[in-house]
Image: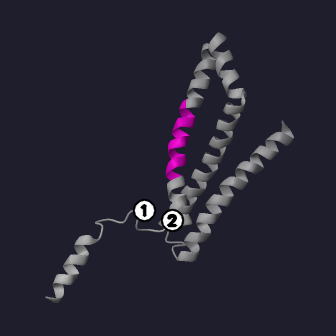
Amino acid sequence: MANAGIDERAAKRPLSPHLTIFRPWLTMAMSMAHRITGVALYAGMALLALYLLGAGFGGFLHALTGWLASGFIGGLIVFLITWAIFHHTLGGVRHALWDRGLYMDPQGRELLAQATLYGGVGLTLLLWVLKSLVG
């Protein structure tokens, strides 16, 4: 009879953890952002391919893709892709460190998550500031 209570509680538990059970934390958010930036980079490369096709065909298509890329929306897309590249790269470095068993403790995981977040933003801003100074 003592085991009956355990079986009832086990039946009410979810079979796998999910977002309604776990409280959100920075490492979880950075993991999701890593996946999202990976998908965004595929979309960015597709846009780059379209831009290069427009340049290759010349004429009206080149003028159209050049106009789209030079506007506010095009600049915003390029800025966000720049951030996605840095964020995704730093996320890959974070995973490479974990693959070697480094920074696996809670403080280390938090440190790497913060480094990924602030490093991606910082490197993006640094690159764009340098670009504005040079160009």
Query: What residue occupies the far right of the structure in this picture?
Result: 133
Which quadrant is home to the N terminus? Answer: bottom left
| N-terminal label among 1 and 2 | 1
Q: Amino acid type of disc 2?
A: Pro
Q: Is residue 44 left or right of residue 59?
A: left
- CB contact under 8 Å: marks 1 and 2: yes
Q: Residue at x 56, y 65 (%)?
A: 26
Q: CA distance from mark 1 to mark 2?
A: 8 Å
Instruction: Tell me where the magenta segment starts and ends, as one range.
Output: 34-46
- Give percent across and percent down for residue 77: 64, 36
Query: Which structural element holds mark 2?
Result: loop
Examine the rendered structure and indicate whether residue 125 appears above or below residue 53. below
Side of 62 where 93 appears, left or right: left
Q: Which disc number belongs to residue 112?
A: none
User: Which residue is under mark 1?
Assistant: 19
Residue denoted by label 2 = 24
List x then y, in percent, for residue 68: 67, 24
Placement of 55 over or under 77, stated as above or below: above
Q: Secondary structure at mark 1?
A: loop
